[in-house]
Image (cartoon, rainbow, N blue to C red):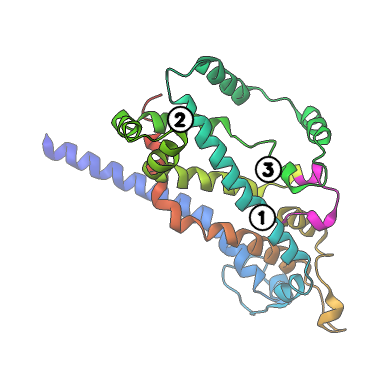
Amino acid sequence: MVYQKSLSVRVSQYILNTLLFITSVIMIIPILHVVAASFTSQAALIRSRFVLFPTEFSLDAYRYIFSTSTFFNGIRISAFITIVGTVLKMIVTLMFAYALAHRNLPGRKIMSYAVLFTLVFSAGMIPNFLTVLGYGLRDNLFALILPGLVDPFNLIIIRTFIQNIPGEFEESAKLDGANEVRILFSVIVPLSLAAIATFSLFYAVVLWNSYFDAILYISDTKLYPVQVLLRQIVMLAGGIGDSTSLGSDFYVPPRTVRMAVITAATAPILLIYPFIQKYFTKGVMLGAIKG
């Protein structure tokens, strides 16, 4: 009986691993195609519509998108929005979550219900636009950060994570004369690094990939983040570089330009994943044990 159970477990694991492997391959192939196509010449790409490895290596697409400061400026704007936005979002989320983690906080239930309400209902596009306009944030990069400063789902998970921290740490800090701010940043934050790293990445990915808010609130093309430029280049396949500076006979390869912009715009955020991946399971699961 034990042998049959062990055999069934091994078969189940084999089937599960096979399915995960197939799913991973299905997800990786499009990424490999985009990267390979960005380094392939336009002529080779016309002959072979689908490539997984560059057949005729070419940097023409990258030479074109980096021939002006437009793409660099988009990367700089996106980096500013992502870094500043992630820091502000995590600070406010941690402070709010730390307050809600205290069951004796006056008005705690009302604030918790208010957070849950925003998780289900939203004001909509027009009220949000009028709010941004009313605060004078039009054509301001903080219009892409402040309206969604706290994500209610992340707030609830982090609050639960803080509630799971033994209260003895906080009591010991109070005996040493620490106030609430000191306890938060000297006790709670060091014990919550896994959750902070995980949800910082969640915030960073959303900020880096956001483009619709920029289309609504930003009309100055010099303030466009890289994702708006990516949208334009995918739709138009031009206008981001200066082909004349690369020579009179330089041909702008439209398809490889699209692939190069997608690769260059995706690479920065992908490089962060390997350093924070180890915190994912711990950071999310510990905050979801009880609530």
Point 66% across, 74% down: residue = 40
Q: Position of residue 198 (x, y in %)?
A: 46, 45
User: Which of marks 1 and 3 precedes in the sequence?
Assistant: 1
Q: Which residue is mark 1?
A: 80
Please identify the quarter of the rendering in which residue 187 is found: top left
Q: Kindly identify the amino acid type of the residue bearing the numbered disc 2.
A: Arg
Kind of residue indicated by mark 1? Phe
Residue that label 3 marks: 145
Write the start and end of the magenta stretch as one range. Answer: 214-225
Task: Please give left or right for residue 214 compared with residue 177 in the image.
Answer: right
The local crowd at label 1, few if under 14, some if 14 to 19, many if 20 or more residues have their Cα within 10 Å, is: some
Distance, label 1 to label 2, CA atoms, is: 27 Å
Residue sitting farthest toward the front: 177
Disc on the earlier residue, 3 or 2: 3
Residue 158 place in picture, x, y as percent: 46, 34
Mark 3, Cα crowd under 10 Å, few <14 / some 14-19 / many 20+, is some
